Image: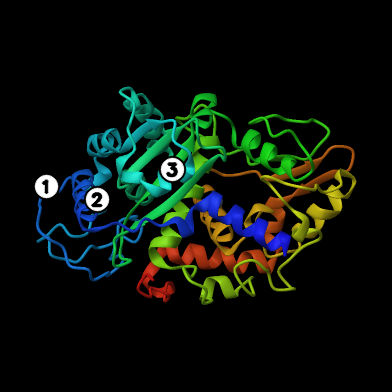
């Protein structure tokens, strides 16, 4: 039971999925106005509460909020293909703060933003440059991008819903050190992975004796690939939340059924050695480093792209989404090396393992033609 509670707590702290914002009427109006301002639409028309979710531009994080805004109810790729308009939107959205993830989730729309918040826009625009073009819409339409010392995980994402449960947008929060350090994906992922083996909780600490994970993404503008990976993962969460790829309240979906029996337990054929013992944050016990190579060999036969993907169906989707974004644009070279024990070549796994491939194919189809794949667009509850 303890393990289940811990897993639930981690789910909350990592995705704040259950911390969706329910706003009273006045707050709701403020929120919607904010969303419109960011989208470049100045209309103050009331909007209906019909959630149509997304239209042709599946990649937007903001749902079609009612269709009562003539000609502009749904953001289109053209709205942000101009770099300047995206830059303006992100300048309004970015918010430097000391608030914790919990504080942000309770009052995301009234967090005081530092006067120098805009200093982070250039780094965000470098990520924009690196992103697959259609994916830029998701970044440029974020309601808020919080950059905070108070965030203790690498980053988190949350959709925003009104008092009817209708999705109206999304925001992300990133640990300030993630921005300042401009870490590589290898630094971020290896640090996080080492936590499960008792590695240092000091951000980005690396024990050379513990597992080393490398994605080696080919960047063209960013000096390192860490922020790209983190953003693709977090935007993947919003695409999930805002389209109900995974259920918000317990029912299984086409996606979750591929690997999960419920929101915490993988099906037997999907899992891998010691999966149930992995813990990344606030851990009471750790994996034995001498088991590491056996664990990653087992992972390579499982249905999961990373050990973190096997935490919950939500992380599973976010990791798969991030992987697809990397595969189509960044020629990743994904290896897991356990010092003294050997290396697992995950590129080979992705080519040959049918369980992983089947899930990647779903994500690829979503990317290519979302309407044919996503059939779980139940109204939000
Ligand atoms: Zn996540």
In front: label 2 or label 3: 3
Q: Which is nearer the eye, 182 or 356?
A: 182
CA–CA distance in space, label 3 to label 1: 29 Å
| Viewport quadrant of the C terminus | bottom left
Q: Which residue is mark 1?
A: 42
CA–CA distance in space, label 2 to label 1: 13 Å
Nearer-N-terminus badge (3/1): 1
- Mark 3 nearby-residue class (10 Å; few <14, some 14–19, many ≥20): few
Q: On the rendered structure, is 247 left or right of 122?
A: right
Q: Which residue is mark 3?
A: 103
Q: On the rendered structure, is 131 left or right of 352?
A: left
Q: Residue visible at 36% across and 24% down?
A: 119
The answer to whether marks 2 and 3 mark residues whose Cβ atoms lie closer than 8 Å is: no
The quarter of the picture where residue 122 lies is: top left
Q: Can see residue 327? A: no
Nearer-N-terminus badge (2/3): 2
| Viewport quadrant of the N terminus | bottom right
Q: For the residue labelled by badge 2, is the local secondary structure a helix, a strand or a loop?
A: helix
Q: Position of residue 74 (x, y in %)?
A: 22, 59
Q: Is mark 3 within 8 Å of ligand 1?
A: no
Q: Position of residue 120 (x, y in %)?
A: 38, 28
Q: Position of residue 314 (x, y in %)?
A: 54, 60
Q: Which residue is mark 2?
A: 31
Q: Position of residue 169 (x, y in %)?
A: 32, 54
Q: Residue visible at 40% across and 37% down?
A: 146
CA–CA distance in space, label 2 to label 3: 17 Å
Badge number at residue 101: none
Location of residue 159 with respect to 281 vertically, above or below: below
Q: For the residue labelled by badge 1, is the local secondary structure a helix, a strand or a loop?
A: loop
The answer to whether marks 2 and 1 mark residues whose Cβ atoms lie closer than 8 Å is: no
Nearer-N-terminus badge (2/1): 2
Q: For the residue labelled by badge 3, is the local secondary structure a helix, a strand or a loop?
A: helix
């Amino acid at each position: 039971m303890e393990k289940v509670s811990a897993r639930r707590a981690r789910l909350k702290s990592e995705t704040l999925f259950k911390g969706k914002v329910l706003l009273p009427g006045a707050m709701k109006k403020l929120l919607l106005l904010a969303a419109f301002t960011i989208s470049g639409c100045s209309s103050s028309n009331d909007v209906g509460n019909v959630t149509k979710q997304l239209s042709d531009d599946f990649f937007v994080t903001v749902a079609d909020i009612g269709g009562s805004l003539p000609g502009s109810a749904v953001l289109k790729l053209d709205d942000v293909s101009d770099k300047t308009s995206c830059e303006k939107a992100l300048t309004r959205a970015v918010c430097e703060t000391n608030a914790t993830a919990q504080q942000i989730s309770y009052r995301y729309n009234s967090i005081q933003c530092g006067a120098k918040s805009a200093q982070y826009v250039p780094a965000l625009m470098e990520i924009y440059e690196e992103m697959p073009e259609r994916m830029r819409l998701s970044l440029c339409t974020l309601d808020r991008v919080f950059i905070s010392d108070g965030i203790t995980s690498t980053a988190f994402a949350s959709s925003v819903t009104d008092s009817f449960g209708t999705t109206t947008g999304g925001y992300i929060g990133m640990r300030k050190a993630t921005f300042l350090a401009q870490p590589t994906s290898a630094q971020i992922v290896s640090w996080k992975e080492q936590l499960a083996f008792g590695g240092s909780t000091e951000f980005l600490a690396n024990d050379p004796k513990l597992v080393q994970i490398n994605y080696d993404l080919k960047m063209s503008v960013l000096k390192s690939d860490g922020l790209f990976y983190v953003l693709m993962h977090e935007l993947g969460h919003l695409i999930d939340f805002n389209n109900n790829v995974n259920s918000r309240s317990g029912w299984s979906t086409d996606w979750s059924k591929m690997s999960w029996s419920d929101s915490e337990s993988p099906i037997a054929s999907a899992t891998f050695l010691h999966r149930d013992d992995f813990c990344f944050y606030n851990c009471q016990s750790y994996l034995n480093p001498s088991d590491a190579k056996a664990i990653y060999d087992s992972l390579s036969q499982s249905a999961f792209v990373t050990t973190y993907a096997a935490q919950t169906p939500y992380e599973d989707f976010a990791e798969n989404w991030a992987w697809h974004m990397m595969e189509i644009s960044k020629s990743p070279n994904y290896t897991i090396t356990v010092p003294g024990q050997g290396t697992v070549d995950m590129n080979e796994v992705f080519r040959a393992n049918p369980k992983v491939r089947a899930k990647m194919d779903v994500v690829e189809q979503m990317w290519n033609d979302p309407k044919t794949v996503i059939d779980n667009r139940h109204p939000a509850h």
